[in-house]
Image (cartoon, grey):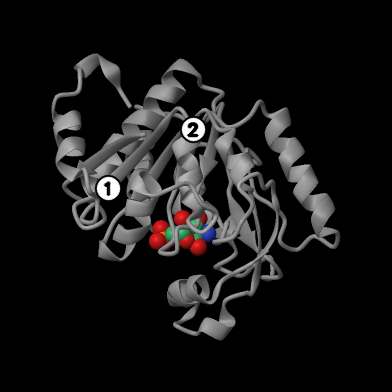
Amino acid sequence: MEVIILQDAAEIGAVGADAVAALLDRKPEAVLGLATGSSPLAIYDELARRCDSGTVSFRGARGFTLDEYVGLPAEHPQRYRNVIDEVFVCKVDFAPGAVQGPDGLAADIPAACAEYEAAIRDAGGVDLQILGIGTDGHIAFNEPGSSLGSRTRIKTLTRQTRVDNARFFGGDVDAVPTHCLTQGLATILEASHLILVATGRQKAEAVHQLVEGPVSAMWPATILQLHPHVTVLLDGAAAQRLQLVDYYRETYRSKPEWQGI
Ligand code: GLP
């Protein structure tokens, strides 16, 4: 796991966008895993700028989102399918229909989850997955206690996640759905490269557990320790509980230029 501590969101955006751009350069038909939430926005904004200026194109690429609330009406602005459209997809040049997400309105939820797994598999799997992390250590919506071998399925959101996400629902925690569909931890682990972004002090404990804690369903993100290619992009506040912070900084400073992330 590579831990990179950067100055601010702008630097995180540039490093993350470099990785996406390098992938699209060598594989224009790449499959991207797209997270919602505020953490990846700097990367999406930077990619939108580069797409505008013609240095990167998503024309041949495909995308899969991580998760979705159950039961939000199709036109609801917080439905993740609409969120990802608004913050990223509509700002770049994906072909129509190239980005899909799990169907939180499906009548048959288990069937919809199985179809989503099959769609990712049929696309050849995710080349690069962008991730955020919850304050309780969830990735996508795999809350504490999630099976480390889980696949796409329905989950009940924790109170803490609903409180954290109430800011997107006018501060009203009761307006946050109680259930979601989420790629499982085993699904996420099948991506070739994972880039996890975390900023701010409120993420410091989850980041410490992710990087330095024991692998445990209590901190679902710790499963990433088993993946051979994970890059963690942090600001100083999110890194403040890391035990080996000086080592991570030194490693990045002295990294061979040819190496990339
Ligand atoms: C949400 C999403 C996750 C996201 C996380 C952190 O609940 N389901 O995919 O990574 O919480 O969100 P943020 O980046 O806004 O802190």
Q: Nearer the viewer, residue 66 or 57?
A: 66
* Figure quadrant of the N terminus: top left
What x and y, as percent, mark residue 238?
26, 56
What x and y, as percent, mark residue 108?
85, 59
Residue 159, compared with residue 110, is above or below; it is below
Residue at screen point 20% across, 55% down: 240
* Figure quadrant of the C terminus: top left
Give the residue at mark 1.
Answer: 234
Residue at screen point 20% across, 50% down: 8
Label 2 or label 1, whichever comes before in sequence order: 2
Image check: 250 left or right of 96?
left
Q: CA distance from mark 2 to mark 1?
A: 19 Å
What x and y, as percent, mark residue 65?
58, 47
The quarter holding residue 251 reads: top left
- Tell me the number on the disc at residue 190: none
Q: Nearer the viewer, residue 1 or 27?
A: 1
SS class of the residue under badge 2? loop
Judge whether residue 143 can be spotted in this image: yes
Residue 173, compared with residue 98, is above or below; it is below
Image check: 106 left or right of 6?
right
SS class of the residue under badge 1? strand
Image check: 77 left or right of 203?
right
Are dots 2 and 1 in contact, CB under 8 Å?
no
Q: Nearer the viewer, residue 247 or 177?
A: 247
- Tell me the number on the disc at residue 227: 2
Q: Label 1 sits on what residue type? A: Leu
The quarter holding residue 69 reads: bottom right
The quarter holding residue 106 reads: bottom right
